[in-house]
Amino acid sequence: MDEEYMREALIEARKAYELGEIPVGAVVVKDGTIIGRGHNSRQRDQQVSSHAEMTAISQACAFLNSWRLDDCTIYVTLEPCPMCAGTIMQARISHVYFAAEDPKAGALGSVFDLSVVQGFSSYPIIHQGLLAREAKNIMDSFFAKMRDKRRKRTDEL
Amino acid sequence: MDEEYMREALIEARKAYELGEIPVGAVVVKDGTIIGRGHNSRQRDQQVSSHAEMTAISQACAFLNSWRLDDCTIYVTLEPCPMCAGTIMQARISHVYFAAEDPKAGALGSVFDLSVVQGFSSYPIIHQGLLAREAKNIMDSFFAKMRDKRRKRTDEL
């Protein structure tokens, strides 16, 4: 089932890809039901908080009419940044599955690991690497396309 | 001027107080103009991201039509949590002034300090303690009122 939910997160990532956004997707699941979905839409929205996880969490809060997401699991295609990891912990989400690592901004192990900082009131359990290759392929394909575009623009000058 | 902006953040905190929310307020300033304001409204909204800083930053992004808030300063009455500190860094905000410390969840020195974790692409300069007593007074008054209410409810049982 975890793989199935991560595939839903990958579907969200592809939506971001099609929109020209860095392709990250997320879903929030409670009791076997997807109660929130999101894809990165930061360029379109020009909102710093329009990361996939934030949108999925916001939908889940609206669905449950609760800012606390106890007993929920989030599946996300890229390791959360500090903003998203902080939001996950604030919401008391129980489990985080992330696919690809983010060496540039990852806050669950890559740059640092928020989930092992002592002193907070709630900690999720972290599961890393599920469908990581699929998630990384989408990212690599996106950045290759961006580089191509940039090269074409430079050639046209 | 910094004190004036922090007083605006305190006005926001009082709005939260009146609504029965933990009294935290924030303003975002660019070139001498307040471009975003917010107060904690998490209980009313039942949204985990309804912290004062998040609302003020969202308004500022909308005002500038940009998810990047370079050369902006945020004034907030309580030390930001990891979610808010992460958002501040994601938005490339230049300066953070916070009034009272938050020993339970503060991510700019109290529980840990996100602004000294090596490896991110942007760091704000942190200024701590401006009007801290005023901010702490509002918080103390709020929690005293909450305890009173709880005691009265218990007495009525």
Image (cartoon, coloured by chain):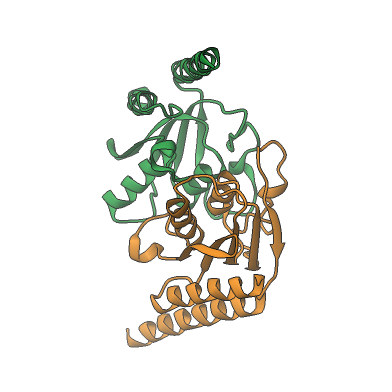
Chain colours: A green, B orange
**Residue beneath the point at 59% across and 71% down:** B5
Q: How far from the left and from the top, in percent, is residue B156?
A: 33, 87
A48 is higher (above) or lower (below) than A97 = below
Residue B62 relative to residue B144: left or right: left
Q: How far from the left and from the top, in percent, is residue A18?
A: 35, 23
**Residue beneath the point at 68% across and 59% down:** B110
Which corner quadrant holds the N terminus of chain B? bottom right
Give the mark count. Answer: 0
Most extreme residue toward the front is A157
Q: How far from the left and from the top, in percent, is residue A40?
A: 41, 35
Residue placed most toward the observer, B131 or B148: B131
B19 is higher (above) or lower (below) than B106 = below
Q: How far from the left and from the top, in percent, is residue A122?
A: 52, 51
Residue placed most toward the observer, A62 or A118: A62
Which corner quadrant holds the C terminus of chain B? bottom left
Q: Quadrant of residue B41?
A: bottom left
Q: Quadrant of residue B77?
A: bottom right
Residue B11 relative to residue B46: left or right: right
Q: In which quarter of the image is residue A106?
A: top right
